[in-house]
Each structure stands twice: as structure tokens, then as C-alpha cells.
Amino acid sequence: MDIHNKSVAAVLNNLTDAFMIMNAHGRIEFLNAVAEKITGYSTSEARGMKCDALFNSAICKIDCLFRWNTGAKKVCNKRELVIHRKDGRPIMISCTTSTIIDTDGTVAGAVDVFKDISKIKLLEENLKDSEYKYRRLFESTKDMIFITSQKGRFIDFNQALVDLLGYKEKTDLYQLEFIEKIFINVIHWEVFQNQINLNGYVKDFEAGFKTKDGSRLHCCLSANAVKDDQGNILGYEGIAKDITARMDSFRNLYKNHQELVLLNTIAVTMNSALELDDVLATALNKVMKLLGFTIGAIFLINREREGFDLQAQKGFSDKIKDDPVELIFHDKELKEFFLGPDNFVTPKSIFPSFKVSLDNSKTRKAILLSCFLITEKEKPSGFMAFWIKNDEELSIEDFHLLGSLGNFVGGAIANINLIQTVQKHREELKRVTAKLFQSQEDECKRISRELHDQTGSSLIGINLKLDAVENKIPLDAEATRTLLHQVKGQINHTYLEMRRISHRLHPALLTDLGLEPALDQYISEIAEQTKLDITFKMIGFTGRINPDIETVLYRITQEALSNVLKHSKAKLFKLSIIKGYPSIIFLAEDDGIGFESDMNHPERPALGLLAMRERVMMRGGKFTLRTAIGEGTRIRIEIPLNKEGGSRKECLQIPLQESYDQ
């Protein structure tokens, strides 16, 4: 090859690869333009140099020595090596050397074809590094990553998917072939696939994964569709987060909330209804709904008949109350303990459950029930019994709920029994108080009659005899006559005082004419005897009302006026009695000094107020008192027209003092 020919040199310079020609002695004869650019030497500078000197590479030196010393006539294999440019900068090249053989078979020279592969190598290193980082991220993340075909066949997945699903090796999971087999519900995979096909991605899709042992893994999936240049879906790549713990926490939180709602519902029921059956039925229904039970009952211990009473039930036949049933305890000693006299238990948050069978004598079918103790003041008062399927297991949280409910219901039973006992005693006290007031009224009537009929008649008779004595006294016995006049005056005064006392004990007008005439006379007498300005009116009365109510209103008026005169230092007293429906309203107010609202204040006329309140309560009414130092006193009373007495609820809620509307 005539390298000095300009046409040949032009062709070589236009090659994209570097081209170097050496003579038979291994010295450089020619470098094309690309070779000059790579090495930094021009042809004139490189001519006469050996390639190892030009490349400044130890590998190249060894290779050249072997070739020229042995007279190798073969073509060297393609190799990669690092050379150094004229300026000393290293460059990696890919080099192929071919030997030029003369016509007589001798080596006439060699041709090196090489190119700069530094950038390619850099890209390869970057690619390897990216692949390493990707694989490290792919395998080290704790979230599950998967890549599937469009039909859902596994292409790749990370170790987290293997571990979280409970498999040992990837090969075990590959044997499933399709990702849909790890979904608990295949419909979830179908919905997931439809959404990603429609939108190209899915975000925060919740589904259940099935582990190797069959347990559930609650997951949140996000994935993208992998498409070709034409937009056709080739497969899916996605990530799944294990949110089982989060969902368990949410369920526990929701369950705790439901438990609080349950206990609050029972508490509200206790406040609104004092019937034990209502409280127990509410507790049973709520806990069965919360825990998903279908059959349940509450039995309370009946120590009088040494047995157990069915107090509430749900899910049983309605005939269970009519048909005789027998509770068969699997632990007979436990039954004896419940019914025994010394059945004290140490308070605990939860007691062990026990089993009983409910046996119906007609159907002869026994139902196995799991039971949970109800305790009341360190003693068992009954138990809750539920039918639980064999495959159902209660969690420790469920046991704690039932234990808390048992203690809570036991407290409710104790409170209701206490309230009923208090109410019973209160009813007895009401009856005793009513008899006391009635006896008092009867005694007042008797004394009033005796004072009027007997004592009054006796005084009149004495006065008449004194008149006869006076007629027989000599006219000159002035001292005797004067003394006799004084005695007669004392007798007349005593008679008038006796009539006044008799009237106050029980006015005849109240019995004969009614409340308004009796109060008119009484208030007129008070107004004449004191400087108190009294305003009195009765509204809406067209006839007589219940004599007992008339007596109550009369006595209350007496007590109110007596308190005003003794304690209030008032100048004005207003009394209004209004007949409406369904109650009579009694309003009494003064402009006196008032008093502290504390019922136990020693300077207060508490006994009189208590007597007033008791009289009102006996009629099922409401007594309200409002007072303060320097602000006078106001009493408001409502007495039902058509009630002989107050209901239990009204009696329990009657306040001695409360604020009220003007």
C-alpha cells in the first residue's frame, strides 16, 4: 500500500476508526486523522516510533515484542487496553492488529485499527452502577415490589414479597405463576387490573394478600402499566405496602370506641330508666351486636329459690320464658359456690369463663353456652351466656370487654337495687308522713271542736253565772262589783283568744265555704294585727277543689306568712293562687332581707320549709325556692289537680331550691 499516495491518505483520513501502519521493523509509518486526534501525535511526530512508545502502554509493549520477535503472521485478537496520549491523559481503546505479509511470505508490516471507547466504558460503568443501585433498592426495600405480564404472570419480584408472604425461596413463589393466586379475593385482582387498564395506574388500592399459611395480609397497592411504543400494555409494575398493623390498630381503636359507646349507652339507660330489665336488655343487645353473637342471655342468681332467673335474652325462641329450661353446669362445684352463702369473690377486671348447657324439657335440645360472670359488691349476682361457634375464638380484647361489662352491669344492678330500696323506703316515708299530716289535721279539728264546743260553752256558762252573782251584790259593794267586772273581762278575752286559736287550728270557713273565704279571713286578721302590706288574689277558681289540696294550700300560706312575720322584716307580701291545667300554681314573695340558700344554715327556718315541701310532695307537686341576702324570698309551688300523689320519678327530682323563670 502506497501510503504516500494522496488519494490513499485521503481515504484513510476519512475513516471513522483510528488507522496506524507500521513497517517490518515495527515502526510507525502513518497515522490517519482519527489516530492523530486520539494519540495527540501527528504523523510526522509519530513516524519512526514503535507502537508501545506511542501508546505508552505496558500491555502493548509486551504484545509488540511477542509479535516482532516471533515473526507472528497471524491476526491478533481484538483487545481493550489503556493508552496514554502525548499529554499523558489515559484513554481506553479497543484495538485490532493485522499483520501485512509480503508475496514471499515474509512480514512486511502491520496495521492497527483502534477507536476511543472511553465514553462507552463510562456509560457501561454507569449502567452497571444504576443496575446495582436499582437491584439493591429493589431487593432491600421492605415493601413488596412485583413485575408481571399483562395476564398477571410473575416476571420478577423482590425478597420482601417472598418474606412477607411466608415463603422460603423465590422459586417457591414462582411456582404460583400468576399474581392473582396471592389475592384472598380474586375479584380484587380483577378490579385492580380493570382500573390500571383504564387509567394506566392505580394508587392506594386496598386488598388482602394470602400468606403461605393462609393468614391475611392487608395491603395497599400502587402500580403502573408498562406499555410499548404503540401504547399497548405489556405488563404491570407495582409496590404493595403491608398495612396490617395499621388496620389492626384502626380496628382496635374502633372496637375501643364501640366499647365506650356500649358502656355509655348502659349508663344513659340507667339514668333514663330505673328498670333493671331495660338496663340488662340494652347491655345484652349492644354487646351481642358489637361481638357478632346471635344467641345470648343474662341469668341472675335467685337465692330465695336457689336457682337462676332468665332476666334478658336474644336469639332464643320466644317460648323460652314459658317452657321450663334447666341450666346444666359443667362445673357443679361452681354452681354450688354461686348459690352458697359464702360466695365472696376478689374483685378482678376479668374472671375465667365457664360453660353451661341450656336444656329444654320439651325439645330435649341442649345448647352449649360460654358464660361470663357478673359481680356485685364482691359477690356473684349472675352471668352473661352466649352461644359461640366452634370456629370462633374470642380475642383477649373481647375477654376484657366482657369482663368490664360484667363489672359494670353488676354495679348497675347494685345501683338499681339501692335506688329501688331507697324508693321503697321513701314511699313508706311518704305514707307515714301523709298519715302524720292527716293525724295532725284530725287532731287540730278535734281540739278546735273541743275548744269551740266545750271550753267555749263553759266560758259562756261561767259568764252567765257571774251575771247572776252580779245582780245579787249589794249596790254599796263597789269593790266587789269592780273585781267582778275585771273577772268577766278576763273571761271574755280568754273566750276571744280561744276562738282565735280554734280558728287557726282548723278554720270552720275552710270546711264550710272553701279556701278563698278562709284565706280572706285569715289574711285580714294578720293585716289588722301587723303593719305588713299584704296583696292576695285567687285566679281561675269557679268552685270548690279537693279538700285535701285546700288544706295543703291553707297550711302553706300559714307557714309562709309566719316565716315572713318572724324572720324577713318585710314590708310587702304578695300571694297569688292560680288555678290552671294541669296544676294549681302558688306564688308567695316578699321584699324582706332574704337568707342564704344553704339548707343547713342555722338561722334559717328550715323545719317550716321542709314541712311545706313535704306537704307539696305528698300531692305530687314541685316546690321551688329562690332567695339571697338582701333580695327577699320567693316560693313557687305547683300541685297537680288530678293526682292523689307524686310519681316516683317526680319525688326523686323535687329540688328544695332551684332557679326558675320569672
Image (tube, rainbow, N blue to C red):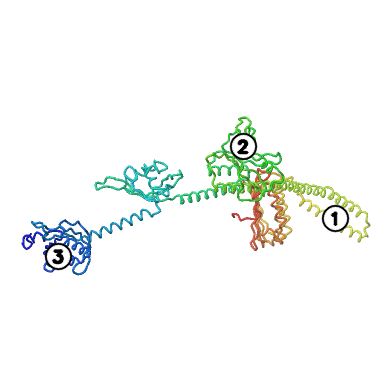
The circle drawn on residue 357 is: 2
Q: Nearer the viewer, residue 305 or 620?
A: 305
Residue 301's place in the image compared with 563, above or below, is above
Q: Position of residue 26 (x, y in %)?
A: 14, 64
Is mark 2 in CB contact (under 8 Å) with mark 3? no
The residue located at (89%, 53%) in the rendering is: 467
Position of residue 590 measured from the top left corner of the image (x, y, whole percent)? 66, 58
**What label does residue 36 carry, if any?**
3
Q: Nearer the viewer, residue 537 or 613?
A: 613
Mark 2 is surrounded, within 10 Å at the Cα level, by few (under 14), some (14 to 19) or many (20 or more) other residues, namely some
Whichever of labels 1 and 3 marks the residue nearer the N terminus, that label is 3
* Mark in the foreground, 2 or 3: 3
| N-terminal-most mark, 1 or 2 | 2
- Callout 1: helix, strand or loop? helix
Identify the image quadrant of residue 371: top right
Q: CA distance from mark 2 to mark 3?
A: 103 Å
